[in-house]
């Protein structure tokens, strides 16, 4: 999708160096000698892992570095205008009026007590573009341009009343309100489902194509960059290690770091991860739509089976409906040493289904069967005893570990809670678990804040394995991680499954990740399983329109499988 760009770039960064002040008064370099150009109507993707300097580069271009951050060298030019030495008041005119920002997290980027229409209108008023009364009318039109359905009604709502995708569209409306020459999109879709992600990126692409707006796209997702960028700039440790047209860089990456990023990026072309003698190619036949996959005569009894489970939640008085059906007649089975992936968009019911499997929710109807025993009505001491056999790994490695504990205390806690072994035996078990998840023994003395995201997730996995469960529920376990760290965690999970015969219920909205680990896949929509069967069958030859839509929305699906974008 090559576009023609003007000879004078909209954004030009030359020799940018950024450092952060340290507690001892020194400086830690974060960006070192970065050169970057973005032309009119061009999308340039700045790609790298966490800590590579990509967001720091973007924030420096907006004069929005956090406290302690300082541009120590280099120049910034916008449409040829040197931005060096601008006062804060002058920068306030540049931001919003000439450069728009689409931040990563719509949950924290909008004022929760101001209607969204007023937040869009504020940009127009602050920059003196229209009168306040006219700004409200213009705000509705901007929401429509950003792809918000029923914009007049949405303008009167508060952020908490909108979905994540709609909130991100509001941020786009704010970013484009003043007709800026440049939009900086900092991980604008990392928290969104693939179908919503595609619609947001489609809109940013249309802005570049139709209005000549320059777009600097910050992302750790090489699939997104492959699909959307004219050029890709790869950052590692604050240094540009490679740049070039997207098609060339993907077809012929020249730097080892770029090659590693491409190799780690999941796509439907990825093969099933296997360990040793485990046969990742063997698959059962498909199941009837929405029904339970029929076990082969050679298959062992499932570790977990859900049989027609339904979950209803009571709604507040005054609602048109008195109950919300979150899960409706769901049946599935997970065998020992096998992975069943439950996929779907936010609100599809997959997380509620996982909570039913863990007996964190009681079903309104149907049965939950664990190791051949009906546990639907289990409670109290019986339920606590059962929970030794099934454990969970949550999405966020940052929120799921107690920051007051050391790693040793975190992994020891389930052993202590269930009275397993004496102190010396528990210490031996914890050291074995830490070795199992490929962490050095010295992490036991550290706290979660001292670990990277990937290390924290390894600790969470070690904790989940402490009681030697038969079933582990993995709720979006890699969606918060960079692609290379994601690949390491997936390989770890497959190895642990092979070594311990674990059954996995793997909850995800990312079908490319699912392709690497799943034996069976169930696709959920509006509380029901609409398609279910062997992973290859569902992901490579989907029969339902909804499944085909999910597959088509996978970023980088064509580019990373070796075809041109």
Image (cartoon, helix red, strand yellow):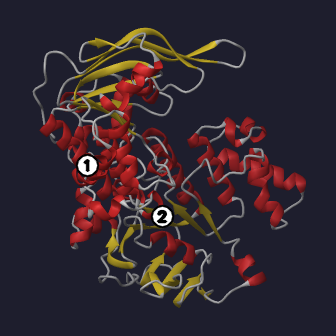
Tell me the element at label 2. strand
Please state if 531 lies on the left or on the right of 340 as rendered. left
Q: Nearer the viewer, residue 56 or 275?
A: 56
Residue shown at the point (39%, 60%) measured from the top left: 509
**Can residue 419 be seen in this snapshot?**
yes
Residue shown at the point (26%, 32%) measured from the top left: 180
Residue for badge 1: 138
Relative height, residue 403 to residue 416 (above, below): above
Horizontal and vertical percent for residue 295? 41, 82
Real-space CA distance between mark 2 and mark 1, rounded to the nearest whole angstrom: 45 Å
Horizontal and vertical percent for residue 117? 36, 53
Residue for badge 2: 506
Residue shown at the point (51%, 73%) measured from the top left: 352
Q: Which quadrant would the N terminus be assigned to in this image?
A: top left
Quadrant housing residue 287 = bottom left
Please state if 166 lies on the left or on the right of 370 as rendered. left
Q: Nearer the viewer, residue 114 or 362?
A: 114
Residue shown at the point (56%, 52%) measured from the top left: 396
Relative height, residue 406 to residue 466 (above, below): above
Question: Which residue ends up furthest to the left in the rendered image?
Answer: 4
Tell me the element at label 1. helix
Relative height, residue 250 to residue 500 (above, below): above
Q: How many marks?
A: 2
């Amino acid at each position: 999708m090559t576009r023609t760009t003007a000879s004078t770039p909209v954004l030009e960064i030359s020799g940018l160096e950024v450092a952060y002040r340290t507690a001892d008064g020194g400086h830690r370099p974060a960006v070192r000698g970065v050169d970057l150009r973005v032309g009119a109507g061009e999308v340039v993707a700045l790609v790298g892992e966490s800590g590579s300097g990509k967001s720091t580069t973007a924030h420096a271009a907006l004069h929005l570095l956090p406290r302690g951050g300082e541009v120590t060298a280099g120049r910034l030019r916008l449409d040829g205008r040197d931005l060096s030495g601008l006062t804060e008041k002058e920068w306030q005119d540049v931001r919003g009026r000439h450069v728009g920002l689409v931040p990563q997290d719509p949950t924290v980027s909008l004022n929760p007590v101001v209607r969204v229409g007023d937040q869009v209108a504020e940009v127009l008023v602050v920059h003196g573009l229209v009168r306040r009364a006219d700004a409200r009318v213009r705000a509705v039109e901007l929401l429509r341009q950003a792809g918000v359905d029923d914009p007049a009604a949405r303008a009167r709502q508060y952020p908490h009343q909108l979905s994540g995708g709609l909130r991100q569209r509001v941020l786009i409306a704010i970013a484009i309100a003043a007709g800026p020459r440049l939009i900086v999109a900092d991980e604008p879709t990392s928290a969104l489902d693939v179908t919503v992600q595609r619609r947001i990126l489609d809109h940013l692409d249309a802005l570049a194509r139709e209005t000549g707006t320059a777009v600097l796209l910050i992302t750790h997702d090489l699939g997104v960059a492959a699909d959307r960028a004219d050029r890709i700039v790869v950052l590692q440790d604050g240094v540009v290690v490679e740049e070039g047209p997207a098609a060339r860089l993907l077809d012929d990456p020249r730097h080892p770091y770029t090659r590693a990023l491409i190799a780690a990026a999941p796509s439907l072309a990825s093969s099933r991860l296997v360990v040793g003698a485990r046969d990742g190619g063997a698959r059962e036949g498909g199941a009837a739509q929405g029904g339970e996959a029929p076990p082969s005569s050679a298959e062992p009894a499932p570790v977990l089976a859900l049989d027609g489970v339904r979950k209803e939640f009571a709604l507040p008085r005054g609602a048109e409906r008195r109950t919300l059906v979150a899960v409706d007649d769901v049946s599935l089975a997970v065998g020992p040493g096998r992975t069943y992936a439950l996929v779907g968009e936010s609100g599809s019911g997959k997380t509620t289904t996982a909570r039913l499997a863990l007996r964190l929710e009681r079903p309104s109807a149907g049965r939950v069967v664990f190791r051949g025993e009906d546990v639907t009505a289990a409670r109290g001491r019986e339920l606590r005893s059962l929970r030794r056999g099934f454990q969970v790994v949550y999405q966020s490695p940052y929120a799921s570990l107690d920051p007051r504990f050391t790693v040793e205390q975190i992994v020891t806690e389930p052993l202590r809670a269930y009275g397993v072994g004496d102190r010396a035996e528990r210490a031996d078990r914890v050291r074995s678990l830490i070795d199992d998840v490929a962490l050095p023994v010295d992490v036991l003395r550290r706290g979660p804040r001292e670990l990277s995201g990937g290390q924290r997730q390894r600790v969470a996995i070690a904790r989940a394995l402490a009681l030697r469960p038969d079933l582990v529920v993995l709720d979006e376990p890699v969606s918060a991680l960079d692609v290379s760290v994601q690949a390491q965690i997936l390989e770890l999970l497959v190895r642990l499954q092979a070594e311990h015969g674990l059954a996995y219920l793997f909850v995800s909205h990312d079908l490319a990740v699912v392709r690497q680990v799943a034996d069976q896949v169930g696709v959920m929509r509006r509380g029901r399983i609409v398609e279910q069967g062997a992973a290859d069958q569902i992901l490579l030859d989907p029969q339902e329109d909804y499944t085909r839509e999910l597959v088509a929305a996978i970023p980088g699906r064509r580019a990373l499988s070796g075809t041109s974008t």
